[in-house]
Image: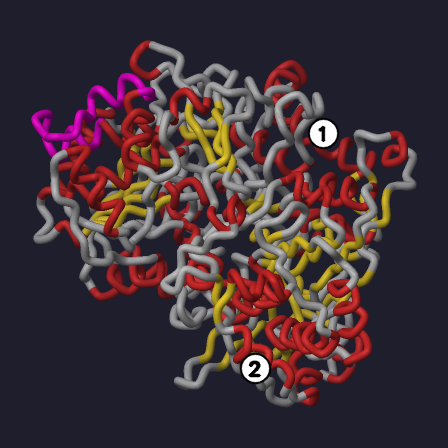
Amino acid sequence: MSRKPPVNDIDERDLEVDEPEQSAAGVTAVAVTMKRAIEQMGVARTARTLLKLNQVDGFDCQGCAWPDPDAGHRHTAEFCENGAKAVTEEATKRRVDRRFFAAHPIAELREKTDYWLGQQGRIIEPVVLRAGATHYEPITWDNAFALLADRLNGLDSPDEAIFYTSGKTSNEAAFCYQLFARAFGTNNLPDCSNMCHESTSVALAEVIGIGKGSVSLHDIETAELVVVMGQNPGTNHPRMLSALEKAKQNGAKILAINPLKEAGLVRFKNPQTPRGLSGIGTALADLHLPVRVNGDLALFQAIGHFLVEWDALDHDFLKHHTHGFDAWAAHVRDLDWDVVRRSTGLEPELIRQAAEMFRDSGATVTCWAMGITQHRNAVATIKEIANVALAQGNIGKPGAGLCPVRGHSNVQGDRTMGIWEKLRPAFGDALRDEFGFEPPREDGFDTVDSVRALRDGRARVFLGMGGNFVSAVSDTAATEAAMRNADLTVHVSTKLNRSHVVTGREALILPALGRSEKDLTGGKAQRVTVEDSVSAVHASQGPLEPAARWLRSEVDIVCTLALATLGPRHVVPWATMRADYDEIRHRIARVVPGCEDYQARIDQPGGFVLPHPPRDSRTFPTDVERAKFSVSPIEVLHVPEGRLLLQTLRSHDQFNTTIYGLDDRYRGVSGGRRVVFVHPDDIEALGLSAGATVDLVSEWTDGSVRRAPAFRVVPYEQPRGCAAAYYPETNPIVPLDHVAEGSQCPASKSVVVRLEATS
């Protein structure tokens, strides 16, 4: 049993490439799950942990935000391979203690990868890096809070502090965190949504009046057509494959739209069924459109063109619930097919086949993820997806709707609880009325603006509630320089990552309880709540003994820091809320729309679903009180001769910046991560060969050049002129200012690069 962390870091010379797989899950997924879990947790702890994962009386997965089946309809093993890896990372028996920090100076740790850092184990006591020191050293909780409070209170303005939030934070911790930031006096509340689905939130809020998806899990399972675009569910949210399998069994068609043909959408071998275990599995996608990177906007205008031409429209819905249809219809009728070909890389006949699937469906669910949201025109693309749904009345009826698939377990709940740099007026009024202070009203910094503020000296203290900010943000060099410019960087974390070794002049690491662990804050068994991708809110309560008895919960850390910073006589009852999370939920019920009677509703098995007017009643809280069609021009990305259009993506052994291992099983890669997938004909045209080592070089209109070195060239079927590689290794070549228009989401899915061969 390998309870000890790896001594050596990644050696890319061990990298091997084989043929991509044509199916996902099956017996192999079970074997990998058990091997990883038992190595780090042992047999008994593995069983105790995984059998409580995603259960009504258990805890919510730390990984993706895929919804759970209704209470009474869940499997004994209600988890996927990558969900089990996420739990294993947190519930590991490996430990990072004071001996570790004494043995490893900060200069050495800075040379390590996120993989090596994360594999060392759980951090079990607070540590501080003093100004000019060479090592982190232990610090008591009281002294850590006093140091942070002193630095916050010493700022010239509250807006010199940044309060970042990861999507794993519970609703209770998120509510307290935004409350503390606003009581302190700032709306600087960047979060991981700024880097993933912010384009979705902006687009949907404008066109349907709410920045959330409009479907339930039942809708997906009973749809006549499910469109899966810009995402790879087999790796990023594998439990979605079970829902797609049920949809197929119910007679649905599945349309896959993605530059790469991913194994999970080819065939699913469900390990919980005899058919899956036998190796037969279920074929999923009926049609795959290998769209060129950034071609989705043109594709959906072309689909809209056919639907208008065929009059495959819901005229009653258009008449009573929408605004702007005529302008959109005129726009898509006048489509330039040459532009569509150049943008999508697809011939009209193939697009016509996809449009026929829309035409023939009486209820369509369209799903998307970061392959859609991280482009310069992402907001416009999502509006175009909504246009097609509106044209056919596919919102607010069974088996239909818009389904952005969130990538982190509670990123949607964080936003619901007020984690947003833009304070909604009604939410601010509710905070004022409940707690008796006037919150700041001006917009704060989002993620990109936070980096700019740190870079420019307009922010001096960075506090991160979970996550790995340094590795997650684009433009690695600029982000790291900005963090080093801070006076103090603080991270509430369970495990080490790169953000802990790229620090301000002082740094703190405050170790928190994990979601899988018992929380006895205040002397009682506490529970927290989370919200999934379909707006369902439910309780989560860990079964494990904490990694160390002196670890504190995120709620405890936030409330204790607020007491230290604002004083015990502050109008917010921090001590009361810290001692009993029910007190937090009572206040959530009075402040957060849709959370009335919150405490009683989470007592229901499986929790409750937040209101969603478009879904629930076909009412649209936009400025015109109807759903809005949008007209967007198609802009074809120009790729110069000898260049490729790169998209960044995850390996199968990865969740965001957390690297579980070094295998991307479905794409045939093992033992390393520095690969670039390129069409075989492009490899030949560029004068390269399979297995060649190249630098990825991006060139920008301001004359700047960015480089990510030493990537192995791997032949891979995809549209000509496109390429793909893993992040965060590719983040250095994406400038901070290369963002989606309207959302500032990093545009990491469309970067023009040249492949420069190395000697």
Q: Amino acid at mark 1?
A: Lys
Q: Is residue 55 above or below residue 406?
A: above
User: In which quadrant of the rendered image does the C terminus lie?
Assistant: bottom right
Q: Is residue 387 above or below residue 586?
A: below
Residue nearer the viewer, 251 or 741: 251
Q: Is residue 577 above or below residue 134?
A: above
Magenta stretch: dominant secondary structure: helix
Expressed as whole percent of the image width and height from the top left, the position of residue 701 reads: 44, 85
Label 2 sits on residue: 634
Query: Which residue is at a point 25% across and 50% down the rendered structure image?
Result: 162
Query: Which residue is at a point 66% across and 21% down the rendered structure image?
Result: 72
Q: Amino acid at mark 2?
A: Ile
User: Residue 35: which numbered mark, if any?
Assistant: 1
Q: CA distance from mark 1 to mark 2?
A: 48 Å
Query: Which residue is at a point 46% across and 79% down the rendered structure image?
Result: 705
Q: Nearer the viewer, mark 1 or mark 2?
A: 2
Expressed as whole percent of the image width and height from the top left, the position of residue 186 reads: 19, 49
Determine if the magenta segment contains residue 579.
Answer: yes
Q: Is residue 723 above or below residue 370?
A: below
Q: Secondary structure at mark 2?
A: loop
The answer to whether residue 482 of the structure is visible from this angle is no
User: Residue 341: which numbered mark, if any?
Assistant: none
Part of the protein shown in magenta: 560-582
